[in-house]
Image (spheres, helix red, strand yellow):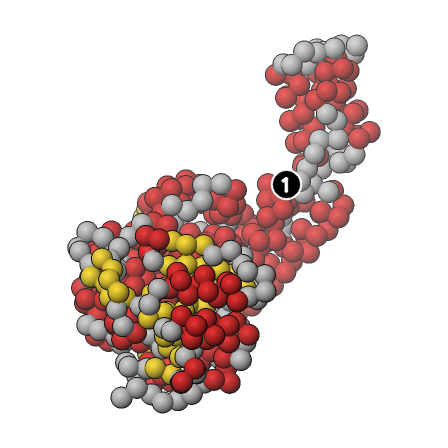
Amino acid sequence: MPNKKNYSQALQHPIFKVISQATAELQIDSYVIGGFVRDLLLERGEHKDIDIVAVGSGIELAKKVSSLLDHNPKVQIFKNYGTAMLHAYDMEIEFVGARKESYNLESRNPVVEDGTLEDDQDRRDFTINALALSLNENNYGELLDPFNGLEDLSTKLIRTPLDPDITYSDDPLRMMRAIRFATQLNFRIEPESLEAITRNKERIKIISGERIVVEINKILMSEKPSIGFALLHKTALLPIIMPQLTALEGIEEIEGQKHKDNFWHTLEVVDNISENTDNLWLRWAALLHDIGKAPTKKFHKKIGWTFHGHEFVGAKMVYKLFKHMKLPLNEKMKYVQKLVLMSSRPIVIADEKVTDSAVRRLVFDAGEEIEDLMTLCEADITTKNPKRFKKYHNNFKKVRIKLREVEERDHVRNFQPPVSGEEIMETFNLKPSREIGMIKDAIKEAILEGEIANDYDAARNYMLKKGEELGLKKA
């Protein structure tokens, strides 16, 4: 029996009254369904995306709603999908006609035909997303809950309305969505549903990289991303989506010497960094900071396990992974590459005997990313030994003090040479040549090594000295 609970008080926003009026004038039925209803019942704050299902034409309902609103917002129509969208009250409202769907094995795009509200709820991915609130005058605000989604909300359960094998095989992206919702809401996936994801894992291959990345990004931006990645691992989706990550799993032991499991360590690092930043790309850097360790792992009798050059190898792997997954190959990718490449550098300068020149070089190489790099390195501390944990964090506090002192004194972040190439050319009457680059590099090295101050007079005098050494004469 449908649940008779009424939530009309939650539908007092003017937009719902307008949709209800439009529904009455068209003599059809309409309902708000999906994420808005789910988050309303979970009290998860304001929802800016609203899905309306009409038992009739969703496009005609959208047009009627627009005509009743003061500013008559433009209606975007997507004829192929039978949907329409408009913006009102700082919200994005999508209208669709109630429909039945059938699928073939090669695509997640269904064959669609008109249906009832029950048909439309059947096709929803999860019971918690099949909840609908009536916008009709005769039962305004009534909850229609044919699959006990309300109970699943209270017991924190992700469950499919129909047979999970059918649900996931029809649209394999739903496997990613199940794991994403479990992560975002801290819900558990029903055991049979979880097993169905594993059974249908190969179906994920028909989903585009762009669609998968949307879900991965949402998992990464959740409060505790490790929940999602552990589920992706458990269901065997992760080796298909990101084999570079699962290649890190496992502990090898040779002659009594072990190394840590870099996969589970990585998930700890991602959780750690998520407590301190909402920067998606910094979280990506945490996820990928050790991916170079699998291909660089070696055992040496004298020194044990090594991962020499894993940062350099990992940075190159970032490009391949971003390209394969259809992630942006722009400044965001370069930012992740840079942090992966530099991820071990601050650890080296944590030594108390470190020189100012080493600190200057770190600030120079990291530039604007120095704070993010330090955040990443601090997140990388996953030792369970309280004394070591405290020691490492104290070391990084000292590093931050050193960084601040050197930067205030030497100003090498986003370094610009005090003497320009044009001035070198004029001083020695040179045309573009390698000598100009040699002098500029020499000035930069002298500043970073602390041989000269980072100011114009010192740099000009050094330029004259280097010019003389190269046999150049002043103009």
Left or right, 291 with reference to 234: right
Q: Quadrant of residue 317?
A: top left
Which residue is drawn at the image coordinates 71% and 37% (left, top)? 450
The quarter of the rendered structure image containing the N terminus is bottom left
Amino acid type of disc 1?
Phe
Which residue is drawn at the image coordinates 44% and 51% (left, top)? 289
- Count all numbered tags in the image, as a single digit: 1
Any part of residue 465 in sight? no
Residue 49 in percent (x, y) is at 47, 66
Any part of residue 115 in sight? yes
Judge whether 232 appears above or below 302 on screen: below
Judge whether 349 appears above or below 28 on screen: above
The quarter of the rendered structure image containing the C terminus is top right
Q: Quadrant of residue 189?
A: bottom left
Residue 321 in percent (x, y) is at 37, 45
Which residue is drawn at the image coordinates 45% and 68% (left, top)? 50
Judge whether 243 appears above or below 171 on screen: above
Query: Farthest residue in the right direction?
Result: 457
Q: Quadrant of residue 39?
A: bottom left
Q: On the image, numbered disc 1 is attached to which residue?
A: 364
Residue 193 in percent (x, y) is at 24, 72
Residue 53 in percent (x, y) is at 37, 69
Which residue is drawn at the image coordinates 56% and 52% (left, top)? 373
